[in-house]
Amino acid sequence: MKAIGSFVTEPIRCDKCLMAAREVLRGPGEFHQGAQIGFPYEGYPNLPIIAGQIMAHEVGEEIDMFEVVLAPLLAPRICHGHTLRVTVLGEGGGERIFHLDPLQGGGILADKPRWWKMVDEVHRQVAEGNDMKPYSLADGMFLMLALCGEVGQAANVLKKLCRGDFDMRDATGQPTADRFDALQAFGRAFDNELADVRIMLELVARFSNTNLDAAVEKKFPEAVKKLRKRGIIK
Ligand SMILES: [Mg+2]
Ligand SMILES: [Zn+2]
């Protein structure tokens, strides 16, 4: 069976990024066929878009094909500091927006949050400073431990709330501030620890090449099915 999906870039403003996109996406390739298009319109610059088709053996594999074949070719050619978004639509209804840039390499990293690049760069420096190859097995084990540590720190903040540590007290130990102040202080501390948890989770996912959003989209419906079967939800 042959499946035909499609891809389209955003309008490309940078000449170097355009050259890169033309090199990889334009013309016939082994698995794709692309062309440059533009919409000249009064008052608007004629910004080029590259769009085309992507072929796969099975329906649903078109997006994987882009991720495995084209994204790794294109991402390293994009200028530093620039990101090129490419939407890929599968014949079977799947779709994905790739955010290609030279640091992230595109593909599995397409859906990373905005702050990811900074976290990734800092982590690489820290790992290398510790003579560890970033995202190697040893690094992955370290990151997993660090994730568990941050979850523990978040739990500890919650424990302190229950224990009353956030309540302000006078010299005799009597509460002096209202509950609102206590909750605000707790909120700030908890926010910080949850941020650490998220950072570590994203780093672990980078180690295992897990696209977290795609993984949840695949996994959660299975959980829903089980809950329905047991009559816990409708
Ligand atoms: Mg922490
Ligand atoms: Zn550029």
Image (cartoon, grey):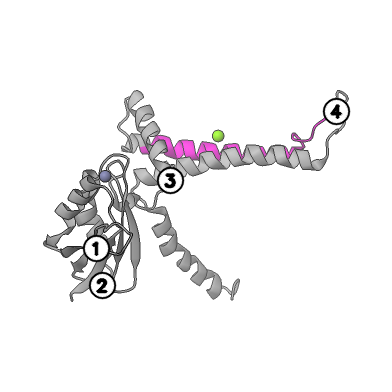
Q: Magenta segment, which residues? A: 140-169
Q: Which mark is residue 180?
A: none
Among numbered discs 4 and 2, the one appearing first in the sequence: 2
Q: Amino acid at mark 3?
A: Arg
Q: Which residue is mark 1?
A: 38
Q: Which residue is mark 2?
A: 59
Please tell me whether the stretch drawn in magenta is mainly helix, strand or loop.
Answer: helix
In magenta segment, residue 41 = no
Q: Which residue is mark 3?
A: 114
Gap in Å between the C-alphas at discs 3 and 4?
Answer: 44 Å
Among numbered discs 1 and 4, the one appearing first in the sequence: 1
Among numbered discs 1 and 3, the one appearing first in the sequence: 1
Q: Are marks 1 and 2 in contact (CB under 8 Å)?
A: no
Front of the two marks 1 and 2: 1
Q: In the rendered image of this protein, does residue 172 appear above or below residue 230?
A: above
Gap in Å between the C-alphas at discs 1 and 3?
Answer: 29 Å
Give the structural element (helix, strand or loop) at label 4.
loop
Gap in Å between the C-alphas at discs 1 and 4?
Answer: 72 Å
Q: Position of residue 77 (x, y in %)?
A: 21, 45
Q: Quadrant of the N terminus?
A: bottom left
Q: In the rendered image of this protein, does residue 167 appear above or below residue 198?
A: above
Q: Are marks 3 and 4 in contact (CB under 8 Å)?
A: no
Instruction: Give the residue furthest to the front.
Output: 42
Q: In the rendered image of this protein, does residue 60 appear above or below residue 198?
A: below
Q: Amino acid at mark 4?
A: Gly
Among numbered discs 1 and 2, the one appearing first in the sequence: 1
Among numbered discs 3 and 4, the one appearing first in the sequence: 3
Q: Nearer the viewer, residue 231 or 93?
A: 93
Q: Position of residue 180 (x, y in %)?
A: 78, 42
Q: Which residue is mark 4?
A: 173
Q: Quadrant of the C terminus?
A: bottom right
Q: Counting other residues with Cα less than 10 Å from the Cα at mark 1, is it few (<14), some (14-19), or many (20 or more)?
A: few
